[in-house]
Amino acid sequence: MQNFLEYPCPNCSAELNFDPIVKDLKCNHCNSVIPIEKKLETIKEKDISGFLSTLVNPRKDIEIILYACSKCGKENEIKENTPSFECINCGNNVVNSTAFQLQPINPSGLIPFSISKNEIQALFQNWVNKGFWTSDDFRKISVLDNLRGIYVPFWTFDAQTETQWSGQAGEYYYKTETYTDSEGNSKEEKVQHTRWHYRSGHYSKFFNDILICGSDEISHSEVSKIFPFNLDELVPFDYKYLTGWESDTYSPEIKKCYDLSKSIINEKIYRECGNLCKIDTYTDLSLVTAFENESYKHILLPVWICTYVYKNKKYNFSINGQNGKIDGNKPISSTKVGLVILLVVVLLVAILFLL
Ligand SMILES: [Zn+2]
Ligand SMILES: [Zn+2]
């Protein structure tokens, strides 16, 4: 049984979309604003055992399902795990709630988009204008056509950690030593030595909301460049926020996300214990860490993604849909690079000539 959700305007029956400016549903036809009822429930962390038990329960194969458009009648073929889409004929926005229901874990919250498509061009222009090396004609391009606003699936992990650490703390001291230089003269110099002391201790730390991207659409390393997201603005999950936007369900590879969160936590613990151990330096640091009270949340976060082609090369950038933070790669002007190299060569020649 498929469950397609559509939100028609009560005044003119055109479609409603979630609007990032008014932060409610808005009709693009008659401009009516229909408030989204704010749920009062709090978004709770869930015990990690629920997450880990789904690891042995992989999702079944993805089927193609049919949607006959309620506006124009056109039959659309979509993947059953596509949470939101528009009719290929008339652009009618539809939310496919089955996409989430198929998964063992459903999103408990999301951060709604706050940055509109029109605001992106200004943010993009500002970002492009910043770099000296950016090619000048690239500064004039418009990116609005290739922009996609996507609710990207994320996991947050919490854990109380208890670490027993031990290592060798190094303390520097200096001795004046004599040596003979190439001309046979006896000289003195200060030489650094290290005295080692065994040290050990206990480090206790609670990690809150380690954020890991769970999407196949964009990698964690890419999207982490537009962190942070302010998770205080999470609202309870509601399909209405998805209408008019793309959204994605989490990748089946959720074990990788859990492992990544652990390695991020372990790295932080290693750094902290290193600081506790060292005097001037440290070595042979060994740690035994116990994870307790582990919990998780599954949430959707707003990300603008743009891939565009410039002079036959592909570039992409992404924008944090909550605060407008932008990251990506931009084409370098070969003319500017050439001119700078030329300038350096001329300067070197001039210096050599003067010498
Ligand atoms: Zn309307
Ligand atoms: Zn249609």
Image: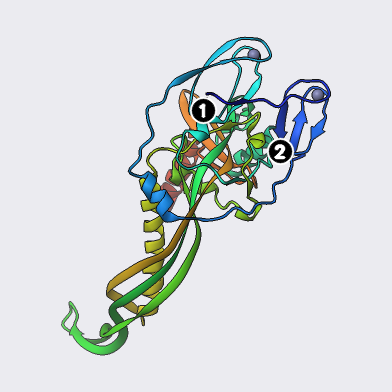
109 in relation to 295, above or below? above
Task: Report the amino acid beneath label 2.
Answer: Pro
27 or 269: which is nearer to us? 27
Q: Percent x, y for residue 258?
A: 39, 51
272 in relation to 171, above or below? above
Is residue 333 visible to us here? no
Dot 1 beta carbon under 8 Å from ligand 2: no
Dot 2 beta carbon under 8 Å from ligand 1: no
Q: Are marks 2 and 1 in contact (CB under 8 Å)?
A: no
Q: Percent x, y for residue 218?
A: 47, 38
341 or 293: which is nearer to us? 293
Label for residue 119? none
215 or 188: which is nearer to us? 215
Q: Percent x, y for residue 57?
A: 35, 40
Question: Splitting the image into 4 quarters, where does residue 49 fall?
Answer: bottom left
317 or 235: which is nearer to us? 235
Residue displayed at 49% across by 42% down = 340
71 in relation to 168, above or below? above
Residue displayed at 15% across by 82% down = 184
Q: Which residue bears the numbered disc 2? A: 20
Is residue 121 visible to us here? yes
Point out the residue furthest to the front here.
1
Secondary structure of the residue carrying numbered label 1 = loop
Structural distance between the alpha carbons of marks 2 and 1: 22 Å
Q: Residues within 10 Å of mark 1 (few under 14, many from 20)?
A: many
Task: Report the amino acid beneath label 1.
Answer: Thr
Q: Percent x, y for residue 138?
A: 58, 30
Q: Which of pointers 2 and 1 lies earlier in the amino acid sequence?
A: 2
Secondary structure of the residue carrying numbered label 2 = loop
Q: Which residue bears the numbered disc 1? A: 82
Circle nearer the viewer, 2 or 1: 1
Residue displayed at 68% across by 40% down = 115
